[in-house]
């Protein structure tokens, strides 16, 4: 199933990025050297990342938030959009 139509990223590719350390939609895009386009895929990617994180690792931001304050990640496309990005 396609998750991101703009970049033709399917669920298997998103899962592979998550398995390789991506933890946010923005980091999935960085994994494939892409930038967020329309943003319609961000909620689905966020759900996939949260599900993967809950089932796979203890180092994810969702687990670390209960132990120590999480640092904000670098926006995926800060140079393109000076106002920030909602994919983090």
Image (cartoon, helix red, strand yellow):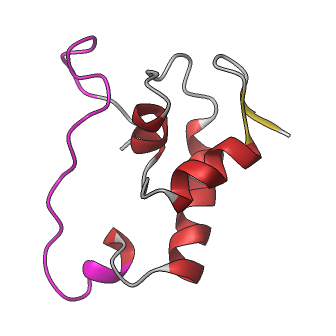
Measuring 48% from the left and 56% from the top, which residue is drawn there? 20
Give the answer, above or below, for where 36 lies relative to 66: above
Q: Main secondary structure of the magenta part?
A: loop
Give the answer, above or below, for where 71 lies relative to 1: below
Q: Does the magenta run of residues contain 77?
A: yes
Image quarter of residue 77? top left
Q: Could you say where residue 31 lies in the image, as x and y percent from the top left? A: 44, 37
| Quarter occupied by the N terminus | top right
Q: Is residue 67 left or right of residue 56?
A: left
Query: Which region is colored magenta?
Result: 63-84
Image quarter of residue 76? top left
Q: Is residue 73 left or right of residue 26?
A: left
Measuring 74% from the left and 48% from the top, which residue is drawn there? 12
Image quarter of residue 5? top right
Is residue 80 visible in this depiction of the protein?
Answer: yes
Q: Is residue 37 left or right of residue 59?
A: right
Q: Does the magenta run of residues contain 3?
A: no
- For the view shown, which residue lies furthest in the right direction? 1
Is residue 87 visible in this depiction of the protein?
Answer: no
């Amino acid at each position: 199933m396609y998750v991101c139509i703009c970049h033709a990223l399917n669920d298997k590719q998103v899962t592979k990025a998550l398995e390789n350390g991506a933890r946010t939609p923005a980091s999935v895009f960085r994994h494939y050297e892409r930038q967020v386009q329309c943003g319609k895929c961000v909620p689905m990617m966020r759900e996939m990342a949260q599900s993967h994180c809950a089932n796979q690792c203890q180092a994810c931001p969702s687990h670390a938030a209960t132990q120590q304050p999480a640092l904000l990640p670098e926006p995926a496309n800060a140079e393109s959009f000076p106002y920030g990005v909602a994919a983090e």
